[in-house]
Image (spheres, rainbow, N blue to C red):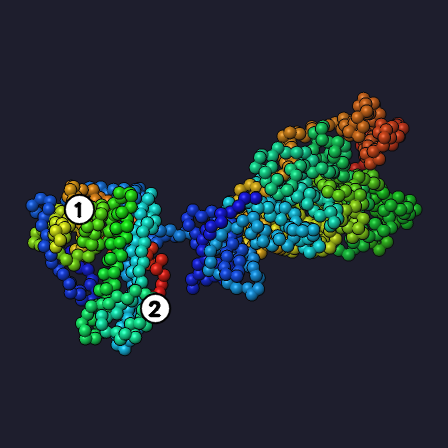
């Protein structure tokens, strides 16, 4: 914290054309006064103190017309400057943050203007109501630095994580490392400052591109100015102490689909693998708008309620126990064959053949497009719903998945979080869900999707559950109005000029927009319910390793052949495992069997990894020629879906 | 060849003192002399000017009571920036001499302002009474200007002081040899015949030869005309100033250098003032500062 100059730096002026009002006023300063756009000032009137933030500035001289300058210079711009400088004024516009006393609300007094000191900043932003005392709910979010004053700025946990209001939206152009960095810094601040009496908190972060969030448990090298900033904000510059990484497999089912595959780090990544049941519960995600009709819904419900996970006997006497996609395909085949043998009937148990074919196409398509995420097993490997840890970050790496897979992961994870929070059995009281590229999941326009509906629901009701959305996007205007509108805290990094021209930024002055358009790295503008005007802040680089540096220090390992990948995973579970022994064990075995045994071993994490793996693998069965490859599922072409894969 | 016509609004007022005598002090006849390339006066140069404002505040019967405020100041220029170095303000009342009853005079004394009496005709006449009050105000303003000039010239530094108007009031003031008077009005003509024509038609960037005029107390004022802006297509007096200095050794020889200083003051233009062609910007600034600080009571 540094002190501001004690002497006034300006005086309020008011004319008929530029009057002082209760919400805005104008003041002049000397040319060299240490104020600029975003600086907080204090006006000391008689019996009234006003705090305000500078939103605009103008400078002009007594020059009546530019022609006088031309004449005085004989029309030659190269003429040496005149001996006297013209009288010049700096006239600033400031928006009122707070008046003391608040009532009666009156125009700003025509009095001396001072640069705000740290105490003034605290009062101006109403932080005195939540940053002091036993009931303190303050979370540091950055450092106010202007006019020679440096002061920490806090947001109110009750308004950031609920229950008063919640959610955070952060916007900014890509490539300036502001959005992700700011959120990671803020998560650190929340984990260190969220009051224990308000319960436990965890974060689920979806890594949607590159290695952005792949190294949150590793320390970064911070320059002195950043460590100083951490000290001023009373935050320990440490990476996250508890991070769990989840990533789906690549289509081979053994190599993880993530950039955190360096041999020193890959042990910490857990596979994210789901079976038929997990997918079927969220089948709506997989259907596009045209598909969502009552008939498809009814058939999906029938499958979920009557077929999957329980013995089922069809009309032709076939016994089914559908627990996997292969089992489901068997049921579909039996239905199609049965109907054909029955003389070309087109209805099965009140469901039309076309509906069955459509649902079958969509579901089977998932097993192809999301291979690696979706397994043919009955059970998969999931986030530890019910056993979430306090102050733990769960990174779900979906960067390698296509849009369908990302939608599925996102929907299922968030829906599960919501279900558990409703039952209060998640393991923590509050969960922050960080989603980058929110404009992709909750676009302002376009078809109504399940994902968008779910995001709207979270943004409107999540605060009561402790489910908090931290959404990042390049263009705020491209995110659904109700999603960004429900975010009580809004953060802006450097903004694109075209974006600033959209209606959502009409309340900002031209100067504020200009500053936003040129905001350097590490600076942001924030709106928060307690701040009546947006405030510019600085924040330090995250103490956790950034994705780009992480990849440089820990380059991803090359994709391994099947056997080597299995060995690596088993060795990661138990260093005593001898690679040649594993290779001998799996030689000649079907890959599905090996994957099944591997997944079971990972889930069980037994004391004797090799013995468990061997037991799950079972004895080798002589194979028929041609049985080396699993039967592939070929989606059927239907009239309703002419573009379905042939 | 007459200059292009210039519109004149209203009839010219009679000039109080149209002619005075002078002798050429540089050569035998007045010539137009180019002064050379403009160069700014050295840093620390001062600019002195004053303002006056007055109005009739009320009457005792038909006896007017005028309230006046006069101010004078010096701005010093350093690295292009002008800042106020000296400033004096005076507020007072003016009444016609000997026309107030004792009770009325006491009432005015109780107001707390100094009271000056204006000499005038003992017979009441609203116009003459006002004219007499105006004379008092003008004399007080001149006195105040003299005081701020004296203050500046008494300062330890030896900077030049450029004064708005003539220097007759500074005779006898220590350091007055560093003062340069710049006169914008040309009511009084000191030259005649060919000398006057040469002086009044001097081209832009030229000055007339120096001429001397004697004051009653033996003081000699040296003076010359300086054309700041071209007058062709304008009025004959457009851009024409008259410079004054109190006679001393080297003043005549220094006329070109001083003229170059003043020529450099063509920019910035004091465009808000109709006399911009003769009014130096720093002198205009002195007025601006004094008016701004005086407030707006009248």
User: Mark 1 — on which chain does it sit?
Assistant: B
| Quadrant hosting residue A323 | top right
Distance (Cα) linking label 1 and label 2: 53 Å
Residue A438 in sight here? no
**Residue A157 in the image: x percent, y percent?**
67, 50
Q: Which residue is mark 2?
A: B111
Q: Nearer the viewer, residue B201 or A550?
A: B201
User: Which labelled disc corresponds to residue A603?
Assistant: none
Question: A411 and A589: which one is in front?
Answer: A411
Outermost residue on the bottom side: it is: B61
| Outermost residue to the top | A580
Q: Residue at x 53, y 42 (%)?
A: A520
How many marks the image carries: the answer is: 2
Identify the residue at image location x=69%, y=52%. A135
Q: Is residue B138 above or below residue A510?
A: below
Which numbered disc flags the more N-terminal residue, 1 or 2?
2
- Specify the subunit that label 2 lies on: B
Q: Position of residue A274 (x, y in %)?
A: 79, 41
SS at badge 2: helix
Along the line of sight, the residue nearer the viewer: A478 or A308:
A478
Q: Find residue B53 and report its horizontal and vertical position in percent.
A: 29, 63
- Identify the secondary structure beneath mark 1: strand
Q: Position of residue B288 (x, y in %)?
A: 32, 56
Residue drawn at the location 28% of the way across and 48% of the way down: B152
Give the residue pinned by disc 1.
Answer: B206
**Quadrant of the image containing the C terminus of chain B:** bottom left
């Amino acid at each position: 914290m540094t002190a501001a100059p004690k002497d006034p730096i300006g005086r309020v002026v008011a004319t008929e054309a530029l009057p002082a009002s209760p919400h805005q006023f104008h003041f002049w300063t000397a040319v060299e006064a240490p104020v600029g756009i975003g600086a907080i000032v204090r006006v000391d009137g008689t019996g009234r103190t006003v705090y305000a933030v500078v939103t605009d500035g103008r400078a002009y001289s007594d020059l009546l017309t530019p022609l006088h300058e031309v004449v005085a210079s004989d029309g030659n711009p190269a003429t040496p400057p005149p001996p006297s400088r013209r009288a010049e004024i700096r006239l600033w516009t400031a928006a009122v943050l707070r008046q003391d006393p608040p009532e009666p609300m009156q125009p700003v007094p025509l009095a001396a203007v001072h640069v705000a000191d740290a105490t003034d900043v605290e009062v101006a932003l109403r932080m005195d109501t939540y940053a002091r005392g036993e009931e303190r709910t303050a979370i540091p979010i950055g450092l106010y630095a202007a006019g020679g004053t440096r002061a920490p700025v806090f947001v109110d946990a009750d308004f950031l994580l609920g229950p008063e209001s919640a959610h955070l939206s952060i916007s900014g152009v890509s490539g300036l490392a502001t959005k992700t960095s700011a959120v990671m810094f803020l998560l650190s601040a929340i984990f260190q400052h969220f009051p224990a009496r308000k319960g436990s908190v965890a974060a689920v972060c979806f890594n949607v591109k590159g290695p952005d969030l792949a190294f949150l448990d590793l320390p970064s090298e911070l320059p002195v100015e950043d460590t100083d900033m951490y000290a001023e904000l009373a935050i320990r510059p440490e990476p996250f102490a508890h991070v769990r990484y989840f990533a789906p497999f690549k289509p081979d089912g053994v190599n993880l689909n993530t950039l955190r595959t360096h041999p020193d780090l890959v042990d910490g990544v857990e596979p994210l693998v789901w079976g038929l049941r997990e997918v079927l519960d969220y089948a709506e995600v997989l259907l596009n708008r045209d598909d969502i009709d009552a008939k498809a819904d009814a058939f999906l419900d029938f499958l979920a309620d009557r077929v999957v996970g329980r013995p089922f006997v069809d009309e032709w006497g076939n016994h089914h126990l559908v627990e996997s996609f292969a089992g489901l395909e068997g049921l579909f085949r039996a239905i199609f064959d049965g109907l054909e043998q029955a003389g070309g009937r087109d209805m099965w148990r009140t469901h039309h053949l076309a509906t069955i074919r459509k649902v079958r196409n969509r579901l089977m398509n998932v097993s192809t497009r999301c291979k690696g995420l979706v397994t043919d097993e009955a059970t998969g490997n999931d986030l530890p719903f019910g056993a979430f840890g306090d102050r733990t970050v769960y990174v779900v790496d979906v960067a390698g998945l296509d849009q369908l897979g990302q939608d599925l992961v996102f929907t299922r994870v968030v829906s599960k979080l919501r279900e558990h929070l409703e039952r209060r059995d998640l393991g923590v009281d509050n969960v922050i869900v960080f989603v980058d590229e929110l404009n992709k999941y909750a676009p302002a326009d376009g078809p109504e999707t399940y994902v968008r509906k779910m995001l709207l629901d979270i943004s409107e009701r999540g605060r009561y559950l402790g489910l908090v959305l931290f959404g990042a996007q390049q263009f705020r205007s491209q995110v659904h109005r109700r999603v960004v509108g429900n975010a009580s805290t809004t953060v802006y990094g450097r903004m694109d000029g075209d974006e600033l021209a959209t209606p959502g930024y009409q309340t900002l002055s031209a100067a504020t927009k200009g500053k936003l358009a040129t905001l350097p790295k590490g600076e942001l503008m924030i709106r928060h319910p307690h701040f009546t005007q947006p405030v510019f802040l600085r924040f330090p680089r995250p103490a956790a390793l950034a994705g780009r540096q992480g990849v440089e220090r820990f380059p991803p390992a090359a994709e391994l052949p099947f056997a080597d990948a299995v060995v690596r995973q088993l060795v990661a579970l138990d260093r005593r495992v001898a690679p040649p022994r594993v290779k001998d064990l799996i030689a000649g075995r079907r890959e599905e069997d090996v994957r099944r045994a591997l997944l079971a071993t990972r889930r069980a994490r037994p004391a004797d990894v090799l013995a468990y793996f061997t037991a799950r693998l079972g004895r080798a069965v002589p194979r028929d020629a041609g049985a080396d490859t699993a039967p592939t599922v070929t989606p059927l072409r239907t009239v309703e879906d002419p573009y379905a894969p042939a | 060849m007459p200059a292009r016509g210039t519109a004149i609004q209203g009839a010219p007022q009679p000039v109080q003192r149209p002619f005075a005598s002078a002798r050429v002090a540089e050569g035998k006849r007045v010539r137009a002399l180019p002064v050379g390339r403009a160069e700014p006066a050295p840093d620390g140069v001062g600019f002195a000017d004053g303002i006056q404002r007055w109005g009739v505040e009320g009457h005792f019967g038909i006896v007017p009571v005028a309230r006046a405020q006069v101010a004078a100041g010096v701005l010093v220029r350093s690295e292009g920036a002008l800042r106020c170095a000296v400033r004096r303000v005076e507020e007072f009342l003016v009444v016609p001499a000997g026309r107030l009853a004792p009770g009325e005079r006491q009432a005015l004394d109780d107001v707390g302002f100094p009271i000056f009496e204006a000499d005038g005709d003992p017979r009441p006449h609203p116009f003459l009474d006002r004219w007499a009050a105006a004379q008092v105000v003008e004399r007080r303003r001149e006195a105040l200007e003299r005081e701020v000039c004296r203050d500046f010239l008494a300062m330890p530094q030896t900077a030049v002081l450029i004064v708005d108007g003539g220097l007759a009031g500074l005779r006898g003031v220590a350091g007055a040899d560093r003062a340069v008077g710049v006169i914008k009005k040309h009511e009084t003509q000191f030259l005649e015949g060919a000398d006057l024509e040469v002086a009044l038609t001097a081209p832009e960037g030229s000055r007339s030869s120096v001429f001397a005029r004697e004051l009653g107390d033996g003081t000699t004022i040296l003076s010359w005309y300086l054309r700041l802006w071209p007058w062709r297509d304008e009025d004959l007096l457009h851009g024409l100033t008259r410079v004054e200095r109190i006679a001393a050794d080297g003043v005549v020889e220094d006329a070109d250098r001083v003229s170059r200083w003043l020529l450099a003051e063509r920019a910035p233009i004091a465009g808000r003032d109709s006399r911009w062609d003769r009014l130096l910007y720093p002198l205009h600034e002195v007025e601006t500062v004094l008016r701004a600080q005086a407030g707006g009571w009248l």
